[in-house]
Amino acid sequence: NPNPNPNQERWLLQPRHRLTLLEKVEGEMVHFWMLEGELHASAAAGPSEASAEAAGFAEESDAQGTRYRAFCCEAIEGGLTPVFSWSGGPRDAHAAPRLVLLALRHMSSGHYVPHQGLAQLAAPYGVPIVVRLATWSPPRDVTLAGAIAQLLRNSSTRCSRQGTCGRR
């Protein structure tokens, strides 16, 4: 599907903006929210079995030192929606339960906290975050498809030379 406004696409990919390539995390996307002082979890379509499992995992993990609930409460009070990937649990007997922070989304603006901010905010709580594989500044006037292709080429070259995928 061609971009209906190629000038907008080029504007989005100016050299001053960095693109980030993140690890693909398997699982169901779950976000946390508060109502009347109580923390709740929900999937994109609303409360689900997976979101209930993620909420239970977060509560159990608090007792083991990973303070998901405190992190979520503080983020929400600060105007950010924490978005996680939930995998494992009773529905997936082959995978260990895993709740990984994917993003923090500003409730008013819709903007996302940069990856470095995720790391800084989640670390004191022991909350695991999605792995950043690479960052890159695209050249001026590149299309989105061209920017992604170049980023992937650069990442695969770094993978073959270093034995890792450019993890930073």
Image: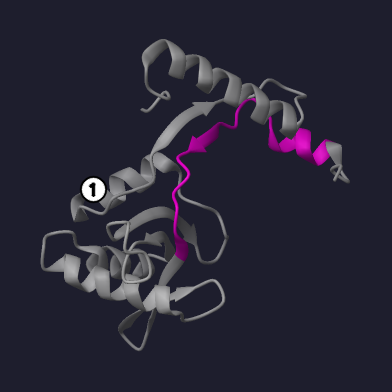
* One can see residue 9 in this view: yes
Q: Residue at x 31, y 84 (%)?
A: 38
Q: Which residue lies most toward the front here?
A: 94
Q: Is residue 134 above or below residue 61?
A: above
Q: Which residue is mark 1?
A: 123
Does 24 appear in magenta?
yes
Q: Position of residue 143 (x, y in %)?
A: 77, 30
Disc 1 marks a residue whose amino acid type is Ala
* One can see residue 41 in this view: no
Q: Quadrant of residue 61?
A: bottom left
Q: Residue at x 30, y 70 (%)?
A: 73
Q: Is residue 79 left or right of residue 10?
A: left
Q: Is residue 97 above or below residue 55?
A: above
Q: Is residue 65 left or right of residue 125?
A: left
- Bounds of the magenta segment: 7-29
Q: Position of residue 4 (x, y in %)?
A: 88, 46
